[in-house]
Every structure is written in structure tokens, then in C-alpha cells.
Amino acid sequence: MARTITYQQAINEALDQEMARDETVILMGEDVAGGEGSPGDDDAWGGVFGVTKGLKGKYPDRVLDTPISESAFIGAAAGAACSGLRPVAELMFVDFMGVCFDQIFNQAAKFRYMFGGKAHTPMVVRTLCGAGVRAASQHSQSLYPIFTHIPGLKVAVPATPYDAKGLLIAAIRDDDPVIFLENKVMLAVEGEVPEESYVVPLGEADFVREGDDATVVAVGRMVSLAQEAADELAGEGIEIEIIDPRTTSPLDLDAIVESVENTGRLVVVDESYPRCGLAGDIVSQVTQVAFEHLRTAPQTITPPHVPPPFSPTLEDLFVPSVERIVDTVRSVTGGRVAASA
């Protein structure tokens, strides 16, 4: 039975249901158990945005506060995963990946390969990404292309509360390390989510909206902006098809190519940086296998190649907008395509 809850609640519910189902699932991170027993607060804070609030009381021995040492607790999660547990480690912001990157890309990501398939590392690193909450350059980046670049890692970027719950459950049950990116701007976004447990498979894109005039691939928070743009463009007679990859690794390239073969046009909207970024990677892969189907050059919509600004005005300009999506689609379709066809 589905009801409306927030993105934040969907993540909390996924963790709760998986911890109830499987006693090997543990949660660890900075302040996930902090605050319990302090004056006026009987429950733990549940991390920097309270996403895991309520779980410490239910699973007191499996919700573990860690020191402010990302290299230590991400490394501990990798070791625990190899020893029979299924740790979910909360890296407070993806920007802090630099402190613990060796433990992720040089250790956890390589265990299965280096031990001839005999080692499994069923760990999840949950982390926050995205600009828009005035958190400045060191807390506002979308760095999932860096993880996508590394063989052995799976990377999920859910765009809705429904996908947040289903993808997280899939990630926890997966036998490989999964980097799970939660956009902090979306935590309060509401959507329909079933009460029961369910899985959204890793590597399976979602056809969010059907259309014949252009394919718009949107990642994470950009999906909702693409939907707003689609409504505006529909009023002009332009129908776009929106694809949400859901995971950047594995990437459901077949779904994107299928759409491009139908529309002949490709626009990729992404909040990560443009250089060596996800948008450019998708364009490159599509161009290599479906060049003959393209009627015009693929386009990318990303932030500029600068750190996220702290200035509210500049930060709003930094993040791709509905207006940029609309203008770009108009450009690749030559305006009112459907009306003139």
C-alpha cells in the first residue's frame, strides 16, 4: 500500500526494514547515535540531517557512532563487509570523500577482483551531495562521476522517494560496494512510497515521461527540473522523453540508446562538473553506438567548471535550471517541432 512520505523518511524506512529483516546490517557514522540521553533528547540525532533518527532505539547494538575520522570508519566498514556483516556507513558529505578515498577505490572496490571472486564486500556508503542549501564549496558538490570512474563500485543517485527506498534496499542486499548519493535539497520532497519492502534493481533506468521530439537524460535532482521543463515545452508542441538512469554504474545505456533511436536528439542534464563528468560520458557512449540516429549534436547542461558558490544569487545560477533545459531543447528541436511536422 502506497502513501505519501518524504525522501528522508523513505531512506529511514529502508534502513529500518532491512535492519529488522537482517541482523547483519549495521549502521555507522558521525552522530548517527549522537545526542541519545542528553538533556531534552531521548533519541539520537540521526546524523547531520536526522535521516537515521529513531533507529538507535530499535537497534541499540547496531547503530554505531564513529570518531571524526572518515578513513577509519570507512575502512572499518570495508573490513566488516568482508567478515560477514552488511555495513551502511554514512559519509556526512560526499565532499569528504578525499579523506577516505583509498579505503573506497583502492580497497573495497578491488577486493572481489584481487581475491579471484572469493571475497565479497557488501557495504553501502550513504552520502549527501548537491548545491542549493547555502552550504558553500566544501559541502555542495556532486562528485558521483569520480566513483563512477572506478571499476568495482556501484553508484546510485535516486531522484524520488520511491527510488530512494527501493534502491537503498537493493544496495544493502548487493554483494558489492555501493555508493549511495542523497541530494540534500530533496530530503523534504514528498512522493508515493509503498509501506512494504521492495527493490528497485541497480542498473535499470526509469522512463519518466514519453515523448518523440528529444531525449532528456536527467540525473538525481535534475529529473524534477526536467519534468517542469517538459510541461512548459508541451505547451509549445514539443514532447520530450525523460530518462532517469537511477544508477550511474551500472549505467543502463540500452535504455538511453533506445530512446535516442526514437527521438534523434539528446540532451543530458547533470549537476556534476562538466570536465570528465557524467553528462559528457553519456554523450560519448551514445554517440559511439547510435551516431547514425542523431539528427543534431547532443547537448549537455551542467554547472560551470567552478566550485559551488556560497552567494545565494551565484549558487542559484550555478545549478542547472528549468529555463536552461527549455532553451536547450528548443535549440536542438528547432523550436515548435511537433507543430511544424
Image: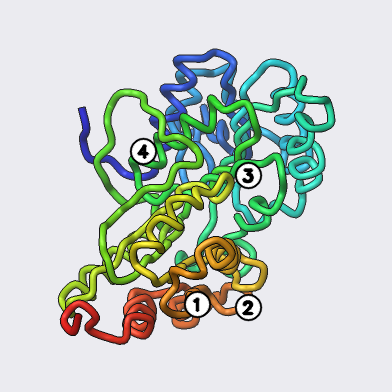
Q: Are marks 3 and 4 in contact (CB under 8 Å)?
A: no
Residue kind at label 4, given as amino acid type: Gln
User: What residue would you read off at disc 3?
Assistant: 91
User: What residue would you read off at disc 2?
Assistant: 306
Mark 3–mark 2 distance (CA, rounded to whole Å): 23 Å
Under circle 1, the secondary element is helix
Give percent across and percent down for residue 4.
22, 40
Give percent across and percent down for residue 323.
33, 80
Which comes before the other along the chain, label 1 or label 3?
A: 3
Residue toward you, 148 or 78: 148
Which comes before the other along the chain, label 2 or label 1?
A: 2
Q: Are marks 1 and 3 in contact (CB under 8 Å)?
A: no
Residue kind at label 2, given as amino acid type: Val
Q: Are marks 4 and 2 in contact (CB under 8 Å)?
A: no
Q: Are marks 2 and 1 in contact (CB under 8 Å)?
A: yes
Seen at 41% across and 59% down, the residue is 221
Residue toward you, 233 or 18: 233
Q: Is residue 285 above or below residue 296?
A: above
Under circle 2, the secondary element is loop
User: What residue would you read off at disc 1?
Assistant: 318
Under circle 3, the secondary element is strand
Q: Which mark is residue 9?
A: 4
Give percent across and percent down for residue 55.
46, 26
Mark 1–mark 3 distance (CA, rounded to whole Å): 24 Å
Mark 1 is surrounded, within 10 Å at the Cα level, by few (under 14), some (14 to 19) or many (20 or more) other residues, namely many
